[in-house]
Image (cartoon, helix red, strand yellow):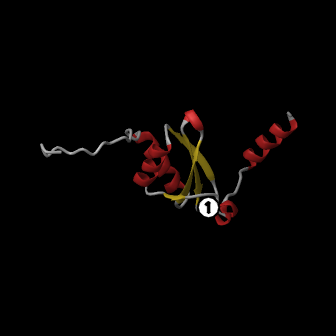
Amino acid sequence: MADGSDTTMTLSRPVPGSLITGIKSFAEDHGGAKAVIEYVGRRGARIVLVGEDGVWGDQFAEGTDIARSACAQAGVKIENSWERELLEQMRPSNDLWRSMGRRTLSR
């Protein structure tokens, strides 16, 4: 513009500090972590975290932009998709197996 003002528009929303803290804490507790971000419609984005020890968990963000920013600020690498190596690294807990069994039996 002729007046020298910046025309760059920022569309990203602020990232909740609790989201960054949660991701960072998970990574610290599990010897590091990687993330896969899944779009879940109006609800936003699911951040699936896989620890180096095979434990996994998830967090939710208002959108994929917020999820990506939170992971970057927490120092967690984002994988583009579910690669074989990442899936093989995951170790489901006994509680998860039990809950999955109940879901199957209840259908």
In the picture as drawn, the residue positioned furthest to the front comes out as: 2
Residue 77 relative to residue 94: left or right: left
Look at 82% across and 42% down and name the residue there.
101
Q: Where is residue 89 in the image (x, y as percent from the top left)?
A: 66, 63
Q: Where is residue 63 in the image (x, y as percent from the top left)?
A: 49, 40
Residue 34 relative to residue 5: left or right: right
Out of 84 and 101, give the one closest to the viewer: 84
Q: Position of residue 60 (x, y in %)?
A: 54, 40
Q: Indicate the secondary structure of the residue bearing disc 1.
A: loop
Quadrant holding the N terminus: top left
Determine the image quadrant of residue 11: top left
- Number of on-image labels: 1
Quadrant holding the C terminus: top right
Look at 87% across and 37% down and name the residue there.
105
Residue 68 relative to residue 91: left or right: left
In the picture as drawn, the residue positioned furthest to the bottom comes out as: 85
Out of 99 and 88, give the one closest to the viewer: 88
Residue 28 relative to residue 1: left or right: right
Q: Name the residue under label 1.
A: 53
Look at 84% across and 40% down and name the residue there.
104
Q: Where is residue 4 in the image (x, y as percent from the top left)?
A: 13, 46
- 68, above or below 17, in the image: below
Mark 1 burial class by Cα count in 10 Å: few <14, some 14-19, many 20+: some
Residue type beneath disc 1: Asp
